[in-house]
Image (cartoon, rainbow, N blue to C red):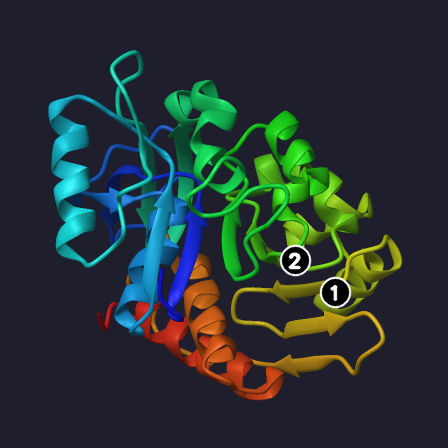
Amino acid sequence: MTKNSIICIGSVLWDVIGRTDTAMALGDDVAGRITRIPGGVALNIAIGLAAYGMQPVLLTMIGRDAEGADLLAFCEKRGMNCDHIFRSSEWPTDHYMAIEAQGQVMAAIADAHGLEAAGAQILAPLEHGPLGDAAAPYQGVMALDGNLTEALLAYIADAPAFQAADLRIAPASPGKATRLCPLLHHPMASLYVNRREACLIAGQAPDLSATEAADALITAGAARVIVTDGAGLTVDAKAGAETVTGTPPQVTAARATGAGDRFMAAHIAAETGGASREEAQIFALNEAAAYVAGKD
């Protein structure tokens, strides 16, 4: 482990994404492009971190199949530490499938059954060495995604091996947002959520503004939340500190899947490098905008 090491826990899988420049409605069959690329929230964040000079350490499940071998080779080629990945012969490598029209996600399905089935086995290096244990918990940054089961996320919220970590948490999707509720009271947790996800976690109506949603989460016990709202206001609220806000640059969207993960990776890299909250937010907004515009 180096000073630039950041542990990334969660989904590492294959994204199958269909993209079209044509507007779509339910049942439409249109021309477009279909690609298969490495993805998953934890891996997307790791890819971004590696691009900013950090060394991601992956904790996940990858199947012992041909797709898993290809995925592992990709991660190793990108300079990621794959020494602690749980490999399984019982479950195949996971997949995610999405359809994007005019830069917006129309529908998506995440098949993370292998990761969910592996459960706490992926956390063994943090609880029984070599990355840490209950007596000497890991004290660096961990990026954690909501593709883990609700039971495992609740376990992480209270487990001694995670109490000293700087936890950076993403829900993965609005449908999985409420899985993060047990982590609201972790004293070192920062939640990266969009406005809709923030409302769901806070148990509030979906029409709250980003500022109102962030305030609701702080009131509910969160130590820190970063709430994004597409092209609207981004809010960084922290208990006992001044709220930081900003608006992303306006760009023409070329893609949508992974934009929030790139924002999170850029934000973590900036703060780890010593940037202030204001500086980190500006950097992350600019990097996410460039990603959405298809510039990398």
Q: Secondary structure at mark 2?
A: helix
Q: Secondary structure at mark 1?
A: loop
Q: Quadrant of residue 295?
A: bottom left
Q: Is residue 256 visible?
A: no
Q: Name the residue: 74% across, 65% down.
A: 209
Q: Position of residue 23 (x, y in %)?
A: 34, 49
Which residue carries the number 1 mark?
209
Determine whether, in the image, residue 24 is placed left or right of residue 207.
left
Q: Quadrant of residue 95?
A: top left
Q: Are marks 2 and 1 in contact (CB under 8 Å)?
A: yes
- Amino acid on which the number 2 mark rests in the picture: Arg
Q: Name the residue: 53% across, 65% down.
A: 230
Q: Name the residue: 50% across, 35% down.
A: 128
At label 1, counting other C-alpha atoms closer than 10 Å, the crowd grade (few under 14, some 14-19, many 20 or more) is some
| Nearer-N-terminus badge (2/1) | 2
Q: Is residue 56 visible?
A: yes
Task: Identify whether 86 is placed above or below 144.
Answer: above
- Amino acid on which the number 1 mark rests in the picture: Ser
Disc assigned to residue 8:
none
Q: Position of residue 152 (x, y in %)?
A: 60, 29
Q: Quadrant of residue 255?
A: bottom left
Task: Identify whether 292 is placed above or below 26.
Answer: below
The quadrant of the picture occupied by the C terminus is: bottom left
Q: Residue furthest right?
A: 219
Q: Residue furthest top?
A: 90
Q: Nearer the viewer, residue 177 or 19?
A: 177
Disc assigned to residue 195:
2
Q: Nearer the viewer, residue 110 or 196?
A: 110
